[in-house]
Image: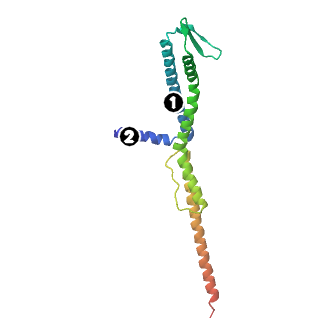
């Protein structure tokens, strides 16, 4: 089991370090496959239900014709489907026809949201907090995000900028303190009479 855990952790790290563009493409491909599988499953279920209706009413599938709306209407010499069954058939046909589009939109939205939460939300939150603290002139923090993708490099660059600002601020405070000491020495010399 440790070997599997180790391989899964290696895979997670590899995924986390993928460039954002490639990661987005991977997420969208997974969404497309999910939409395809869901559409296939839904179509199969709808066709099976339509077959059940046909078998239950002992209809001959050779006696179907397409109506104006593109739906199939089933007739038999002894009668036809009831209004409810006909509505059910039309409903099942519409579900089969539209499910690929609906599933594609839904899976794309779900996986885009998942991509944002997994790949972008944390570094954006880190950078937002860092900007807020720098705006308040608080440089006593670190910016770190454990990834080698673009967001990880951006956070590392931001940390370098923060360090540079912190060093400049310390240098400025040192200069101010040196100026205070120099002013105090001059003031002392001016007050002390020469002999």
> Dividing the picture into quarters, in which one does residue 191 lie?
bottom right
Q: Residue at x 59, y 14 (%)?
A: 72
> Dividing the picture into quarters, in which one does residue 20 lie?
top right
The percent position of residue 100, horizontal first and vertical second, equals 56, 26
Q: Relative to 76, does residue 46 appear above or below in the rendering?
A: below
Q: Residue at x 53, y 32 (%)?
A: 31
The percent position of residue 156, horizontal first and vertical second, equals 54, 52
N-terminal label among 2 and 1: 2
Q: Which mark is residue 34?
A: 1
- Give the residue furthest to the left: 1
Residue count near mark 2 (Cα–Cα under 10 Å), binned few <14, some 14–19, many ≥20: few
Q: Relative to 154, does residue 66 appear above or below in the rendering?
A: above
Residue nearer the viewer, 24 or 69: 69
Q: Relative to 77, does residue 145 appear above or below in the rendering?
A: below
> Dividing the picture into quarters, in which one does residue 6 lie?
top left
Q: Nearer the viewer, mark 2 or mark 1?
A: 1
Q: Count how many numbered circles sit on residues in the image.
A: 2
Q: Quadrant of the N terminus?
A: top left
Q: Residue at x 62, y 75 (%)?
A: 179
Task: Please indicate, yes or no, whether residue 175 appears anywhere in the rendered image.
Answer: yes
Residue nearer the viewer, 182 or 98: 98
Residue nearer the viewer, 130 or 7: 130
Q: Residue at x 40, y 38 (%)?
A: 7
Residue count near mark 1 (Cα–Cα under 10 Å), binned few <14, some 14–19, many ≥20: some
The percent position of residue 74, horizontal first and vertical second, equals 56, 11
Q: Quadrant of the C terminus?
A: bottom right
- Give the residue furthest to the top: 77
Between marks 2 and 1, how big is the CA–CA gap? 25 Å
> Which residue is the site of mark 2?
5
Secondary structure of residue under mark 2: helix
């Amino acid at each position: 089991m440790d070997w599997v855990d180790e391989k899964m952790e290696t895979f997670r790290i590899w995924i986390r370090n993928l460039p954002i563009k490639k990661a987005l493409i991977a997420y969208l491909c997974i969404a497309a496959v999910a939409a395809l599988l869901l559409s296939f499953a839904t179509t199969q279920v709808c066709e099976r239900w339509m077959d059940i209706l046909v078998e239950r009413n002992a209809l001959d599938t050779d006696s179907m014709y397409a109506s104006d709306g593109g739906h199939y209407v089933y007739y038999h010499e002894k009668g036809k489907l009831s209004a409810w069954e006909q509505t059910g058939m039309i409903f099942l046909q519409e579900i089969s026809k539209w499910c690929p589009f609906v599933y594609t939109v839904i899976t794309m939205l779900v996986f885009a949201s998942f991509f944002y939460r997994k790949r972008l939300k944390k570094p954006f939150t880190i950078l937002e907090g860092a900007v807020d603290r720098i705006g308040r002139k608080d440089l006593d923090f670190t910016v770190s995000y454990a990834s080698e993708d673009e967001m990880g490099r951006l956070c590392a660059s931001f940390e370098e900028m923060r360090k540079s600002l912190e060093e400049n601020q310390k240098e400025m405070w040192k200069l101010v303190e040196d100026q205070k000491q120099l002013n105090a020495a001059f003031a002392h010399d001016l007050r002390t009479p020469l002999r």
